Image (cartoon, grey):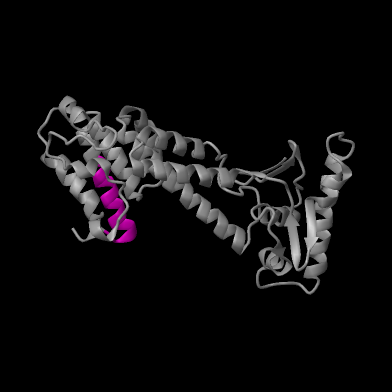
Amino acid sequence: MLKIRVLGPLEVAHDDVSVAPSATKPRTVLALLAINANTVVPLDAIIAELWGDTTPRSARAVVQTYVMQLRKQAAKVLAGRVDAPESVARELVRTQPGGYVLSADEPSVDAWAFERLTTAGHRERESGDLVAASRSFSDALAWWRGGPLLDVQTGAVLNSYAKRLQEAHLNALDRRIEVDLRLGRHYELLGELTALVNRYPTHEGLCAHLMLALYRSGRRSEALEVYRDVRARMIAELALEPSPALRRLHRSMLVSDRAPTDLTDTWQATVVPPRKPAGPIPADLAATSWDIHPAIASN
């Protein structure tokens, strides 16, 4: 089986034997083929990825050389293996009309597994199965080993692909934390959320999650301080006020006069339908995902 790992340093291995080269440009070619496994990548697309607008006249010949190097690398590392016939190395990167294809029977691709699990998580969250959603999102995030294509020199296509994966990762992380908060896991999330807010100080969703986790843990003053910090940073760096949803959460926390233990009980989430809070914080805030949708912005 061909294993392809792009959610971190690039790894391409046949039966756990790496066939990835260390040279920069052949590694870029392999990465482009890997994210399109079993799909023909046009030669012009490879050239554009490698050189952008400064294509040398010898580009086609150079790409052919890189592909030859990939095949030699595969042949070298697979040579002599009883379970790896010679045809494996020869057929791994195949020439097709107009381009090349990384050929494999049912390749194992970490990015595909991540997307499949996050899709399941979103579906389970929407249906109200929060325990299953938390598990799916956690399993999806476990595939990550760092930034996507961490050790690959990226051009326009690979850079766009990596950014899309990074956004999907942050979204899955946000959803997993939201689900865990609704399951009452606020104490367990405090350390993780503090680190995430330090890393993404203007991400309103993560800041809202930290405010909620602190609030439910009886630390209202610290929750309000999180709001003050994010508001000051957004005004200074983005010339923006926080969203209506985040301001509403802040106001709700300001007017509460319950003891911390009562607040924790008030915010305990249950599987859909959620329990109606006894305190002044509106029920919809407990389950809000903190995306700034038009309906929220118009309130």
Looking at the image, is 294 positioned above or below residue 213? Answer: below
Give the x, y percent position of residue 13.
Answer: 73, 41
Position of 187 compared to 85: left or right?
A: left
Quarter of the rendering containing residue 83: top right
Residue 198 shows in the view: no
Give the x, y percent position of residue 22.
Answer: 75, 47
Quarter of the rendering containing residue 213: top left
Residue 159 shows in the view: yes
Give the x, y percent position of residue 270.
Answer: 27, 32
Q: Main secondary structure of the magenta part?
A: helix
**Residue, far bottom:** 57
Looking at the image, is 189 positioned above or below residue 20? Answer: above
Q: Is residue 94 magenta?
A: no
In the picture, the quarter occupied by the N terminus is top right
- Residue in view at x 68 percent, y 67 percent: 45
* Along the line of sight, the residue nearer the viewer: 283 or 193: 283
In the picture, the quarter occupied by the C terminus is bottom left
Q: What is the span of residues highlighted in magenta in the rendered image?
A: 225-240
Give the x, y percent position of residue 236.
Answer: 30, 57
- Residue in view at x 18 percent, y 49 percent: 248
Quarter of the rendering containing residue 220: top left
- Residue in view at x 66 percent, y 73 percent: 53
Position of 263 compared to 128: left or right?
A: left
Looking at the image, is 90 positioned above or below residue 155? Answer: above
* Along the line of sight, the residue nearer the viewer: 241 or 46: 46
- Residue in view at x 10 percent, y 40 percent: 255
**Residue, far top:** 261
Looking at the image, is 91 positioned above or below residue 197? Answer: below
Position of 115 compared to 152: left or right?
A: left
* Along the line of sight, the residue nearer the viewer: 270 or 205: 270
